[in-house]
Amino acid sequence: MEYLLLAASICLCVFKSSLYNVYAKNASPSISATFGFNAVTYGVAALVALVLLLFDKTTASLPTVLCALGYAAVVVSLQTLSIMALKVGAMSLTAIAVMYGMIIPSVAGPIFWHEPTGALQIVGICVMILSLWLLRERREGGARVAAKGWIPLALLCFLFSGMAGVMEKIHQSTQGKDEKATFVLFACLFMLLFSAVGYLVTSAKKKNDGIPVRPVLTFGAVSGLVMGFYSTVNLTLAGLLDSMIYYPVANGGAMVLTVVVSCLVFKEKFDLARICGAVIGIVGIVLLSIPV
């Protein structure tokens, strides 16, 4: 069951990144349009969670509600920043920055939950950091591949991605750990609220900032379906597997598949340095996921 869930998590992650990439580059959304897209996404995801809750029949404890609130704030920030980063940068590099956020919960596991770790895991983290330097955006023919704002956006994506993993782990350490569908439902409702407030605030400052309704509704609805199932699968895995196994394997597999999809489908180019960075990153992921 764990292997099937891991495979599902990897496929849903790559599909979600591809969807965001198409939306960001084709619609070129403003910040208010991005919050509108988020609102549609989380509204649909909440409906998915509600349907799953009918089969789960779990209660809602205070720890679940509080963890869902913190998780919602982190994920709304992550999705908004990811879309803004995809507008100016490559899908592969932006997705890798998000996936490398696994370093944060992987380190937090041994520190806060006393999960086993060893020298290989430490080396693996260092190798992954080295691969980030090789994978970075660089000049080609005297022009930057991405706008100057991509690097800080990617770093923030890395941070919030890691924080999302930590919030999942925190919830799975509370008395409400079995309330997975309830957690996802409350998280989606909070994210819908945050996105709606974000849209109202940003659109009020730019009254002429129109929203492309069709792309927002279409991409948002599909994104919501993916998000609902993806969140439930990830929360289940966070409770079944150690951080040192789950996060490296899930994100490492998604990284490999993302690079393949970005090259074959979106025609992104990888030079020798980036190929070496991707290979080194995979080595780091393997080292990080070796059981102690």
Image (cartoon, rainbow, N blue to C red):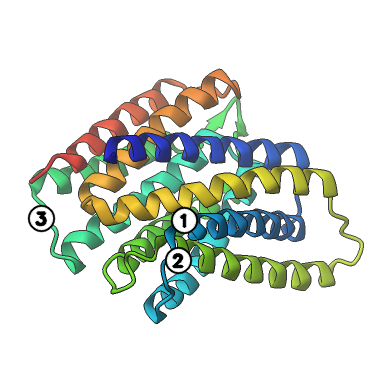
Q: Percent position (x, y) of residue 220?
A: 69, 48
Q: Residue lying furthest right in this view?
A: 208
The answer to whether 281 is drawn above or below residue 186 in the figure is: above
Left-right relation of 159 to 78? left
Could you give the CA–CA distance between mark 2 and mark 1, rounded to whole angstroms?
Answer: 14 Å
Q: In which quarter of the image is the N terminus?
A: top left
Residue 55's disc number? 1
Q: What element carries label 1?
A: helix
Whether residue 179 is situated above or below residue 25 in the rendered picture: below
Reading the chain from its start, which is encountered first: label 3 or label 2? 3
> 102 or 224: which is nearer to us?
224
Using a 10 Å C-alpha cutoff, classify the residue at mark 1 as few (fewer than 14 neighbours), some (14 to 19) or many (20 or more): few
Q: Position of residue 100 (x, y in %)?
A: 37, 46
Hey, what amino acid is under mark 2?
A: Phe
**In the displayed structure, would residue 46 be above or below residue 267?**
below
Residue type at mark 1 is Phe
Toward which corner of the image does residue 174 lie, by quadrant? bottom left
The circle on residue 183 is 2
Query: Taking the image as drawn, is residue 148 in sight?
Result: no
